[in-house]
Image (cartoon, coloured by chain):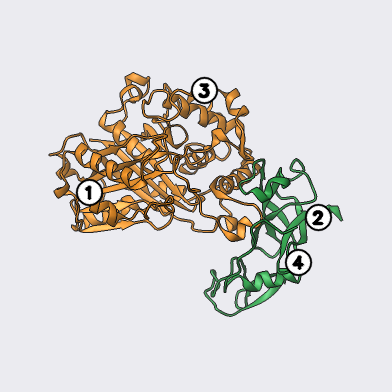
Chain colours: A orange, B green
């Protein structure tokens, strides 16, 4: 595929985030998109594609968030409009497809929610599971993590280093929900069980707020506000089995093939990666994703993460905003927008390079995955 | 006392399974062409695409593929069961099934531990296939 170096992320939109009561999910979508459009130096007339992540059932009194309504409130009449119905993570692939086909010039990708302050349960319930008292994604991923404990002897001794490392990054991020909540290994072990083997510190945050980014061609990016974050590799793999039937709980997940595809397109090796922004719905997700990408061998994570590998000052920084565990939950947009911001050099106190005693970032690898390890996207970005 | 936990909601695909449970039988679709035993039910075999199938009765024996322990009830009706274990059991015939492990404490459960079905008749209409350690008999 010849997509390397053709397209780039050129703007990122933030909103107030964390606990932000009294707002609809739709209002965060609109604010995130509008801020991304402004951030890129574009106007609403320029935007001809809008792609939303899936949206959970709306809170009571709110209408379902669809991209039609988001477009309406943004004053857009896009030539391409779509939304994932479930947890496929194909948004960037859609955007690149319509750009490559010449259907669109500037596409906005968005996700937002008022999950923390609204009154709904953020998970769908499967009637075949609830009869046995099995509820929600933490339990499904905990099933996978338990199998991994059995298969390659991982566990809390490894996961605590992920939780604590990301919290250190969050302490440098003024937007991070957990900025002022330092985490030690002792705190990790004393945090409550969500579903054993996962503690609270193993699980991502629930957040109000939104996030959006703009993608366009590198040619068009030259005229815009920021140094673009250039897309050099993408890959996707979706094992698609119901997690109950899965035999890849302990890997290889979709990350293996998706990662190989992305590296091949980029024409690089893992040694060329300066930092990673990994979809971290749970600590174990970070471990199995990095393992499947090939950063370490089966079960070698416990040694690999030791001595601050992923923390400020570490040799391979991971989830430099604090991630879904310690910054805020905006699906795969939390990792991907952080990678773009880092490559644009706009990350303030947490900026990779001299400021955090880390390597100047040239290339950052990002992941996104959905359902319970059933879908996976890998994206590699480079500095312009 | 009324049963307050969620009950199965059989649909056109899953009704034969739940009807089997009522008779304490674990019924699964088996492909007549390649022999693959599948769950969840489907109109074709995911391996060979044959639509020829029969419902077979599984032995009820298997091993724990993985499990989790609930220390907090996400549904009020499960509060009295805490801590309780949900597990995925790999049946001898191949399919994995989500279930509870009963008859042992959460410290005793292990991945790959042999288990066998332990029926729980929860209402007149429904029986749930739970599993207990195989050596408990």
Give SS at disc 1: helix
Give the residue at the far right of this rendering. B137
Work out how far the residue at label 2 is from the one at label 1, CA to CA, in angstroms: 61 Å
Q: Which residue is denoted by mark 4 in the rendering?
A: B59
* Image location of residue B9, percent across then percent down: 60, 66
Quarter of the image where one finds residue A85: bottom left
Work out how far the residue at label 4 is from the one at label 2, CA to CA, in angstroms: 13 Å
Question: Pointer 4 indicates a residue of which chain?
Answer: B
Give SS at disc 3: helix
At a point 44% along the width and 41% down the height, the residue shown is A279
Query: Which quadrant does the C terminus of chain A fall into?
Result: top left
Nearer mark to the viewer, of 2 and 1:
1
Q: Which residue is denoted by mark 3 in the rendering?
A: A307
Q: Which residue is denoted by mark 1 in the rendering?
A: A74
Depicted B109 relative to depicted A364: above or below:
below
At a point 78% along the width and 54% down the height, the residue shown is B132
Work out how far the residue at label 4 is from the one at label 3, CA to CA, in angstroms: 50 Å
Question: Pointer 1 indicates a residue of which chain?
Answer: A
Quarter of the image where one finds residue A278: top left
At a point 19% along the width and 51% down the height, the residue shown is A75
> Is there CB contact under 8 Å for labels 3 and 1?
no
* Image location of residue A259, percent across then percent down: 41, 46
Q: Which of marks 4 and 2 is nearer the N terminus?
A: 4
Work out how far the residue at label 3 is from the one at label 2, CA to CA, in angstroms: 44 Å
Q: Which residue is denoted by mark 2 in the rendering?
A: B134
Give the residue at the far left of this rendering. A223
* Image location of residue A245, percent across then percent down: 59, 58
Question: Pointer 2 indicates a residue of which chain?
Answer: B
- Neighbour class for label 1 at 10 Å: few (<14), some, many (≥20)? some
């Amino acid at each position: 595929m010849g997509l390397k170096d053709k397209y780039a992320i050129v703007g990122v939109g933030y909103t107030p985030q964390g606990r932000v009561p009294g707002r609809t999910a739709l209002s965060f979508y609109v604010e995130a998109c509008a801020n991304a459009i402004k951030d890129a130096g574009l106007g609403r007339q320029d935007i001809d594609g809008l792609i939303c992540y899936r949206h959970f059932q709306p809170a009571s009194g709110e209408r379902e968030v669809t991209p039609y309504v988001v477009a309406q409130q943004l004053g857009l009449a896009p030539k391409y409009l779509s939304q994932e119905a479930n947890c496929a993570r194909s948004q960037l692939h859609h955007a690149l497809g319509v750009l490559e086909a010449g259907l669109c010039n500037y596409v906005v990708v968005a996700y937002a929610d008022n999950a923390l302050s609204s009154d709904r349960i953020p998970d769908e319930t499967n009637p075949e599971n609830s009869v046995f008292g099995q509820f929600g994604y933490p339990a499904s991923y905990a099933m996978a993590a338990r199998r991994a404990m059995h298969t390659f002897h991982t566990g809390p001794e490894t996961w605590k280093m992920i939780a604590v490392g990301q919290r250190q990054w969050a302490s440098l991020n003024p937007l991070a929900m957990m900025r002022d909540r330092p985490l030690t290994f002792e705190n990790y072990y004393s945090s409550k069980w969500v579903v054993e083997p996962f503690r609270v510190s193993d699980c991502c945050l629930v957040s109000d707020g939104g996030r959006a980014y703009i993608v366009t061609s590198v040619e068009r990016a030259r005229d815009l506000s920021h140094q673009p974050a250039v897309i050099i590799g993408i890959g996707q793999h979706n094992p698609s089995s119901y997690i109950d039937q899965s035999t890849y709980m302990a890997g290889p997940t979709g990350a293996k093939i998706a990662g190989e595809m992305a590296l091949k397109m980029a024409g690089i090796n893992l040694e060329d990666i300066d930092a990673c922004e990994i979809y971290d719905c749970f600590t174990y997700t970070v471990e199995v994703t990095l393992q499947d990408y090939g950063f370490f061998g089966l079960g070698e994570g416990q040694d690999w993460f030791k001595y601050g590998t992923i923390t400020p000052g570490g040799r391979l920084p991971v989830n430099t905003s604090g991630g879904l565990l310690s910054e805020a939950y905006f699906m795969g947009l939390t990792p991907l927008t952080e990678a773009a911001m880092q490559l644009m050099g706009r990350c303030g106190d947490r900026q990779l390079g001299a400021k955090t005693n880390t390597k100047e970032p040239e290339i950052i690898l990002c992941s996104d995955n959905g359902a319970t390890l059933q879908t996976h996207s890998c994206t590699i970005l480079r500095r312009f | 006392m009324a049963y307050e936990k969620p009950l199965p909601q059989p649909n056109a695909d899953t009704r034969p399974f739940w009807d089997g449970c009522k008779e304490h039988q674990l019924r699964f679709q088996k492909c007549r062409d390649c022999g693959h035993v599948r769950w969840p039910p489907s109109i074709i075999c995911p391996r060979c695409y044959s639509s020829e199938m029969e419902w077979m009765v599984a032995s009820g024996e298997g091993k724990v593929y993985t499990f989790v322990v609930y220390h907090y009830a996400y549904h009020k009706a499960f509060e009295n069961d805490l801590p309780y274990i949900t597990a995925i059991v790999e049946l001898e015939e191949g399919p994995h099934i989500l279930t509870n492990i009963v008859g042992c404490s959460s410290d005793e459960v292990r991945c790959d531990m042999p288990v066998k079905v332990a029926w729980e008749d929860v209402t007149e209409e429904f029986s749930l296939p739970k599993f207990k350690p195989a050596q408990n008999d």
